Image: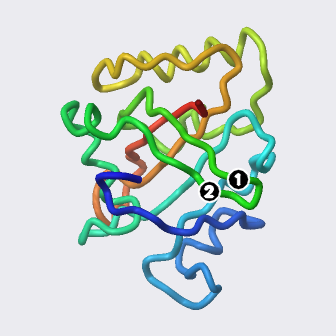
Amino acid sequence: MPGLDLSLPVVRPADNTTYLHRGFDGSESPAGCLFFSAADGGDGALYRVIYGHNLHDGSMFGALLRYRDPEFYARYPTFTLYTPEGAATYRIFSCHTATDTEPLYRTDRTAGADYDAFLQQLTEASEYDTGARPPADARVLTLSTCLTAYGSGMERYVLHAYQE
């Protein structure tokens, strides 16, 4: 992610707890590593979530909170996800706080009017107007971290981005 000095591997786990405290290589690590929601449908899924810790030194997903500043967003509105299938560019369209119980963490989304209404809800939840609007049935990636470093509560900070 340009502007954040964020270039880390993302794993696809069997559950959402294994990589909270394990590195990419499986070794014990208090920082854990970035991971896709275990419930998502893989590379072909319409809607996916990547989780990462908000560490006090700004590493991992801690730097995502820089997107609270609209000027930072204006300089860095896109990022690239590299997979074995190739590179995909994503445009951020919404940045906001959430709780870990919100429907935005459901990854079993299917194309159609309900999905497009969900994308509109995500757009409207943004702390500021990014000017970006996801097209109908867009592939969306949500990046999620705790609102505070080593957060113990349910508050999260999320970015939603659609594949260009």
Residue at left 43%, top 77%?
31
User: Would you say the residues marked 2 and 1 are in contact, meaning their CB atoms lie under 8 Å apart?
Assistant: yes
The picture places residue 104, in percent across and down from the top left corner, at 57, 33
Q: Is residue 55 left or right of residue 103?
A: left
Residue at left 32%, top 40%?
76
Residue at left 74%, top 61%?
84
Residue 1 sits above or below residue 139 on the image: below
Of 156 and 94, the residue lying toward us: 94
- Location of the C terminus by quadrant is top right
In the displayed image of the protein, which residue is found farthest to the bottom?
Answer: 27
In the displayed image of the protein, which residue is found farthest to the front?
Answer: 86
Which secondary structure, mark 2? strand
Which secondary structure, mark 1? strand
Residue 160 sits above or below residue 18 on the image: above
Q: Determine which residue is flagged by label 1.
A: 86
Residue at left 36%, top 52%?
2
Q: Is residue 89 left or right of residue 147?
A: right
In the displayed image of the protein, which residue is found farthest to the top?
Answer: 113
- The residues bearing labels 2 and 1 have C-alpha atoms spaced at a distance of 6 Å
Under mark 1, the amino acid is Gly
The picture places residue 143, in percent across and down from the top left corner, at 50, 47
10 Å crowding of disc 1: few (<14), some (14-19), many (20+):
few
Of 39 and 73, the residue lying toward us: 73
Rendering quarter of residue 55: bottom left
Under mark 2, the amino acid is Tyr
Residue 122 sits above or below residue 45 on the image: above
Q: Determine which residue is flagged by label 2.
A: 82
